[in-house]
Image (cartoon, rainbow, N blue to C red):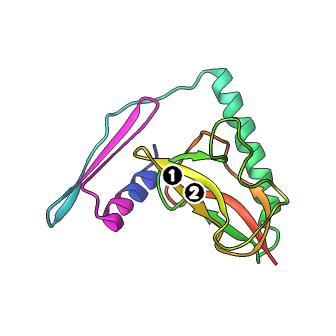
Amino acid sequence: MTIAEIRELIEVVRETGILELEVKRGDDSVRIRAAAGVSQEIVMPAVHIVPNSASAAQAETAAAASAAASAAAKEDARNVLVKSPIVGTFYDASAPGAEPFVKNGDAVEPKTVICIIESMKLMNEIEAEVAGTVIARHVENGRPVEYGESLFTIRPH
């Protein structure tokens, strides 16, 4: 986990007023506790993760695909990035095996549910805020997402 990611988590704790947040990713874990009227405590073990070659290749492939989609989506400055409002797990459908809420090329209106983010055993529906066409999805189904991470790009009508 990077320092920037940890700072984002601290900001989530400050903004939401939650008392404690713990995030585990592989062997990394971070626990942030809000103290009454005092700064947050951060506990992070010193762990160095070395991915195996298969994981690294998959990560590189996913990163390349995401970068290509992001580059194409950013070509038009009018495009709207839909970002994750919380830390959690991204789901593109209401149930395993169900049709995704939206696909690239689908038209959406404000309040159209475009995905779900599971956080602390709660399913949070994420809605489009503009009318337009979905031109890119930046996250794989079932993958953890961070606060502020880009989920979709929508080209407004």
Q: Amino acid at mark 1?
A: Glu
Residue at x 63% of width, y 40% of height: 95
Taking depth in this image into account, of 39 and 125 the one nearest to the observer is 125
Asked whether residue 14 is drawn in magenta, I would say yes
Residue at x 38% of width, y 61% of height: 12
Q: Is residue 74 left or right of residue 11?
A: right
Q: Residues in magenta? A: 10-33
* Percent x, y of residue 109: 72, 72
Please count the marks in the image. 2
* Percent x, y of residue 64: 76, 44
The residue beneath circle 1 is 146
Residue 48 versus residue 70 in the image, above or below? above
Q: Is residue 5 left or right of residue 142?
A: left
Q: Are marks 2 and 1 in contact (CB under 8 Å)?
A: yes
Residue 36, by quadrant, is bottom left
Q: Considering the image in quadrants, where does the C terminus appear?
A: bottom right
Kindly report the distance in space between the C-alpha atoms of the residues bearing marks 2 and 1: 5 Å
Residue at x 21% of width, y 61% of height: 39
Disc 1, SS: loop
Residue 1, by quadrant, is top left
The residue beneath circle 2 is 149
Q: Amino acid at mark 2?
A: Glu
Disc 2, SS: loop
Residue 62 versus residue 72 in the image, above or below? above
